Image: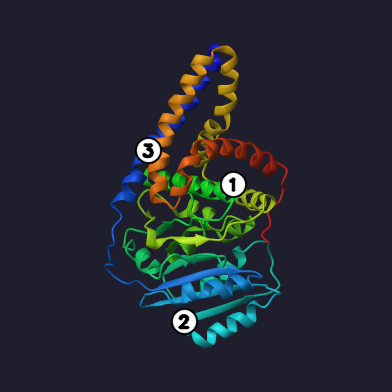
Amino acid sequence: MIFIYLFAVFIVTVQFLFWLSTRHLIRELRLSTDSKPHIYVPFSVLISARNEGPNLSAHLPFLLNQDYPVFEVIIIDDDSTDDSAEILNQYKDLYPHLRVIKIEHKKSAGKKEGLQQGIINAKYEWLVFTDADCFPKSDQWLRKLATKCDEKTDIILGYSPYQKGNGLLNDFIRYETFMTAVIYGTFTLSGMPYMGVGRNMAYKKSTFLTTVNKEKFEKIASGDDDLAVNVMANSHNSVLQFEEKARVISIPKTTFPDFIKQKTRHLSPSTHYRVGHQWLLGLLAMSQATFYPIIIFLCFLNFNLAALIFLLRMMTIVPFQLSLMNKMEAKDLRNKVILLDLLFFLYYWYISFKWLRTKNSQWN
């Protein structure tokens, strides 16, 4: 029985230490200013798109009309069968800095093969990545990324919250994305960058070409963002850019099956992370996934102790979450923190079982 008590203390301690470390992210967000770039480095913005005609039509203007002196936008048409080609041709006539690379007869699943071609053919050293179903929140996106470019920096990790909608599913999708950003942001500021999101990040072309193994990179269908970062990133070459004007808004899934399918695909590359990252992330996930079962079990042994542990954890995480939500496009979720935390626990178990049943990850 003592083991149960010790284990409960252990998982609460893990949670406490993690949320205590988020103070670095809170400080980073508070210190964010409207600083201007020291130098306007040229950017190559890359998007791999497959059958994304409506999204390209809706979102390309946000990219092509960025208030930035020198940049190109490269669309990798990943074997599309819709009207993407016609839409892109129309935009090419209007925007000379738009380039299109057509991928046909693909040799591997996912978008990595196309991204490889885009990276190789990019004109500029700094590569910026986003997706077709996303759009920059402001025309200052590239300027904000440029404020983080210097000789020491190879990787810039941005934030890409999902667009606010109606219903509990939208709330949870946004909360899960918020939590993911809090985790990789906190790890990065603690000197352990392990991933970024391909909807909003940048890195140097030379760093990718000299560090990332092409065959290994293409082996897994998904993970074009986090696997590349996991290989390239270290405590000295990676920075965050979470400022409001540097954010990219993503369009969320509208059905639970589509969301789970997406997240299952995103989970598969994590088994290829560095061992140290896998252990730390596994420990954090374990503390989240086992907290509520332990509390329920303790209620039958010692209700007062169970209530005390529950309150201690909530008193630890809620203030940090509320502070971060104020700065990360999630203010409206503040009054649902405890509910979303419980749903997050259920999500951990469901997505884990779902992923274990999925042998191969494919990108649609």
Specify few, some or many for label 3: CA neighbours under 10 Å numbering under 14, 14-19, or 20 or more.
some
> For the C terminus, which image quadrant?
bottom right
Please, what secondary structure does the residue beneath circle 2 have?
loop
Question: Which of pointers 2 and 3 lies earlier in the amino acid sequence?
Answer: 3
Provide the residue designation for mark 3: 21
Kindly identify the amino acid type of the residue bearing the numbered disc 1. Answer: Leu
Q: CA distance from mark 3 to mark 1?
A: 29 Å
Please, what secondary structure does the residue beneath circle 1 have?
helix
Kindly identify the amino acid type of the residue bearing the numbered disc 3. Answer: Ser
Question: Which of pointers 3 and 1 lies earlier in the amino acid sequence?
Answer: 3
Residue 6, image x, y percentages: 50, 17
Q: CA distance from mark 1 to mark 2?
A: 41 Å
Image height of 364 relative to 51, above or below? above
Provide the residue designation for mark 2: 97
Residue 116, image x, y percentages: 56, 67
> What residue is rendered at 54% in x and 83% in y?
91
Where, by quadrant of the figure, is residue 21 drawn?
top left
Kindly identify the amino acid type of the residue bearing the numbered disc 2. Answer: His
Between 106 and 309, which is closer to the camera in this rendering? Answer: 309
